[in-house]
Image (cartoon, grey):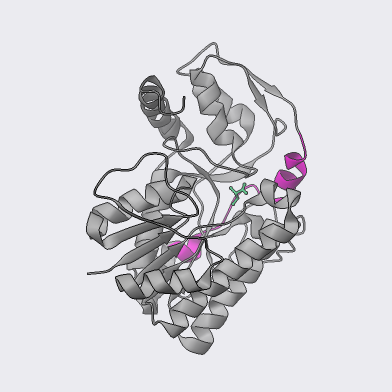
Amino acid sequence: MEKVLVIGANGQLGSELTDALRKKWGTANVIASDIRLPQQQETDNRFEILDALDKAALYRIIEKEGISQVYHLAAVLSASGEKNPHFAWKLNMESLLNVLEAGRELKISKIFWPSSIAIFGPDTPKQQVPQLTICNPTTIYGISKLAGEQWCEYYWRNWGVDVRSLRYPGLIGYKSLPGGGTTDYAVDIYHKALEGDTYSCFLQKGTYLPMMYMPDAIQATLQLMDAPANSISVRTSYNVGALSFAPEEIAAAIRKYIPEFRIQYQPDFRQKIADSWPDSIDDSQAKKDWGWQSSYSLDRMTADIIVNLKVLKEEGHFA
Ligand code: SER
């Protein structure tokens, strides 16, 4: 039986991954942590306040609980990172080094740490980006993720720390809101559509980005963490692909259910970030090594989100 610590458990990915880990390992064996308490909490769920920069506190929890797996998800994303680059660098890098050091010194058996399509930049091929390619990211978030990938491989190569990673595309979920990313529009748009509003999109028509529906992201993460260590040939971070669409295409998918839905375009500073990222990803290495396969199309995802988000909104979840 594994004992799991999730760092950054209140976030968009953290909240859903923590639920999935609780189902897999049992509520008593998963400790969620974040810098502040979650808005709602089931009584059985275990939670610790943890600042990912506080190495001593991290070590205390790991030792007290006998943690064997850490999912370190806390990070400042691309758009927020540009507003405060020095803090983004500090949080993203120092927190990763704390976790990697814990892996080495406290002998944690597995670590998961997310990378991102943000490691790519304007020199990267736009279509079907290969696993190994020119990166040259332009955001501090991308730079920190690329450096982090190298640190992960370094800890694996030199000290055998079993750290695994995925380069997530933009993640789309309906259960919680994203914060500070460039791909956030693809979540916001469903909220506005269900509220009957016109959506003012901060990216221009025709901006294609790699995206993934949250159930696929959870599936990929659990699959990677379950794979035998000798099947993992990539110790930086795996390309994983699922969807690729532009804002007008997600709007058209929504109009199949909400025909009066309207979108308008008001690009801001995030356009430049989106333009520096690729359109689509070649994930053949992940398919070959541990059997990755996405399940959701844009239409299937949209159908699922509209039905479920409507219920959550009626119940007052996002009020
Ligand atoms: N979703 C992230 C962002 O937009 C990319 O990893 O910053």
- Residue 221: x and y, percent? 40, 58
Residue 208 quadrant: top right
- Residue 53: x and y, percent? 56, 66
- Residue 38: x and y, percent? 42, 45
**Is any atom of residue 39 visible in this view?**
yes
Q: Residue furthest bottom?
A: 158
* Rendered residue at 46%/24% (across/down): 319
Which of 100/53 is in front?
53
**Is any atom of residue 216 visible in this view?**
no
Residue 94 quadrant: bottom right
* Rendered residue at 38%/52% (across/down): 17
Residue 266 quadrant: top right
The quadrant of the picture occupied by the N terminus is bottom left
- In the rendered view, does 176 fall on the left or right side of 223? right
Q: From the viewer's perspective, is residue 116 above or below residue 275?
A: below
Say whether residue 275 is magenta. Answer: yes
- In the rendered view, does 292 fall on the left or right side of 204? left
Marker count (numbered)? 0
Which of 140/217 is in front?
140
- Residue 169: x and y, percent? 55, 50
Q: From the viewer's perspective, is residue 44 above or below residue 221?
A: above
* Rendered residue at 56%/15% (across/down): 261
Stretch in magenta = 268-286
